[in-house]
Structure formats: C-alpha cells, structure tokens
Amino acid sequence: MSNRAEAREILRRIGDQPDDEIDLAEAALALGALELPNADLAPYRAHIRAIVEDLAARVAEDPAADSLEARIAHLHAVIGGRHGYSGDHDTYDDLQNANLLRVIDRRRGLPVALGILYMHAARSQGWPMVGLNFPGHFLVRIEKDGARAILDPFNEGQTRSVVDLRDLLKATAGSAAELEPGHYQPVSNRDVLLRLQNNIKLRHLSAHEVPKALEVLEAMRLFAPHEPALWRETGLLEAHAGNLKDAITALETFMALTGDEHHRHQTASLIQQLKNRLN
C-alpha cells in the first residue's frame, strides 16, 4: 500500500469513529502524508512517541508535584524546551505550517498544528485538554480538579489571561470585537482537524487554486463524511470549475445531510439549474 493510500485509509477509518476515539496526532500525520506522499510516517510517529515518553519521564521524576501549574510547566519544558517547538511568526502563511510532517521537521507551525501536539501530549498522561472555539487563533484549555488555564501553543504554551485574550481577539478580529462565552467553548476533535485543513484550503482559494482546494475538501470529507458544509462547499466549487456532474452529486449529498430548510431550498434550485445546463 502506498503512503497516500495508507493515509486515505487512516482518514476513512477516522470518519467512522466516535469523536472521542480520534487520535488527533495520527490523523494530522495522515493529512500531512496526502500532501507529501513520499514521506515515511514511521519517523514522525516515533518523534511523537518521544514527546510522550519525555513528558512521562519528567512527570515520573516528582509524581507528588501534580498541580495544574506543574502540568503546564512540564508541557512547556518538553514541547517548547526539549523539542524546540514555537509558532512561525516570520512566515505565518507558509502552507508548511499547517502540515504536521513539516511542522515536525521545522519545529514551527500554526497555532492549531502546535495545539494538536500539546493536546496529544497532555492526553497521553490522562490530563484533560481541549481545543477552544476562539476565533482567528487556536487555543487549548487544560484542567485539573476544577482549576483551568488557557494556553497559547503558538507562543510556547504561555498561559493567557482574560486581558491577553481580549487583546488577541482584537488583533485578529478587529478593534470592535469583544470576548463572548462562545469563544471559550470546547470544540470536537473533528473540528480541530477541520480547522487545521481550513487553513490550507483558504490559502489555496486565496491563490485561486480551486483544484487544490477541492483536494483538501476531499480529504476533509474522509474524516468528517457527515459534515453538511463540506459537501455544500464541494458542490459550489465543482460547479465553479465546470464539473457539473460532480457538483450535483455533492449538492445532493448535502441535501441528504442538512436540516437547514433555507439552504435546502436554495440548493434544490441550484441543482435544478445545473441539471438544466447538462441537458
């Protein structure tokens, strides 16, 4: 089996899994392999195991010191210190920053790619950690015995205060933006992976590279096959590219999945227009 075929099979299996069983790191490696089909995943899996083992060893040195602050310090020491990961402030928009294989190679990446490493490491120790629905900049939240802290993977896992978060939001969403309860809501594992791939898709769309954006959407549908928005966007892009039969198929799948009556009505009209163009 080729690396690309293996990666697709991994993502297809994830598409059938309950969300809480998804291995974020393995999924992100498979997504990276689709972009780099000649890459051997074994060394990358070994590197992720090394992060987990280094964290476990550090925790074992003083098992009695198991506060929230100690857990955060361990993550800082292993991911940022021992392995040298940080955000890519210089070439933020580089597509490599959203491919976990290249993130591991370069020790630089986007907030969500680095966040996957933090989440995988924390969860390997049984520490609850989730990604948050914070706009424009991916953050993670770690919890212990009712105490919580929000960490910024892009900035060496720094703990962020409410003031920090307000400033960060305004920097990414505009000076009129204000913090809302929804910004603190946890997101699912699939949503973390969708957010990772959206970075790549949007960069392709910005460059008017519709075929590449469609390839990214195809991979997204493998691990999130029941997400209506992916099928709708696929249908619209296929129609834009002149692939009318593929557009109709995708839009009909969207119709079968969505419960949004407004979008169903709009989409039914569009499907009919596309069918008329085919005749």
Image (cartoon, grey):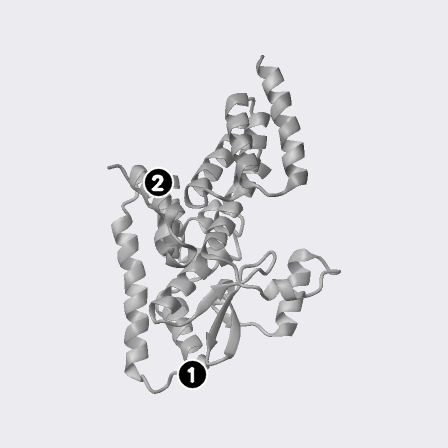
Say what secondary structure mark 2 lies in: helix
Image side of residue 13 versus residue 243, left or right: left
Q: Amino acid at mark 1?
A: Ser
Query: Does 177 appear above or below 268?
Result: below
Q: Given contact means CB atoms under 8 Å apart, are the residues at marks 1 and 2 in contact?
A: no
Q: Amino acid at mark 2?
A: Arg
Say what secondary structure mark 1 lies in: loop
Residue 156 % position (x, y): 47, 67
Q: Is residue 209 visible?
A: no
Q: Which residue is nearer to you in this view: 166 or 187?
A: 187
Q: Residues within 10 Å of mark 1 (few under 14, many from 20)?
A: few
Image side of residue 23 versus residue 207, left or right: left
Q: Which residue is nearer to you in this view: 269 or 141?
A: 269
Measuring 45% from the left and 40% from the top, which residue is drawn there? Answer: 221
Instruction: Please give the label number shown on residue 8.
Output: 2
Measuring 28% from the left and 80% from the top, which residue is drawn there? Answer: 60
Measuring 30% from the left and 73% from the top, which residue is drawn there? Answer: 56
- Mark 1, residue position: 67
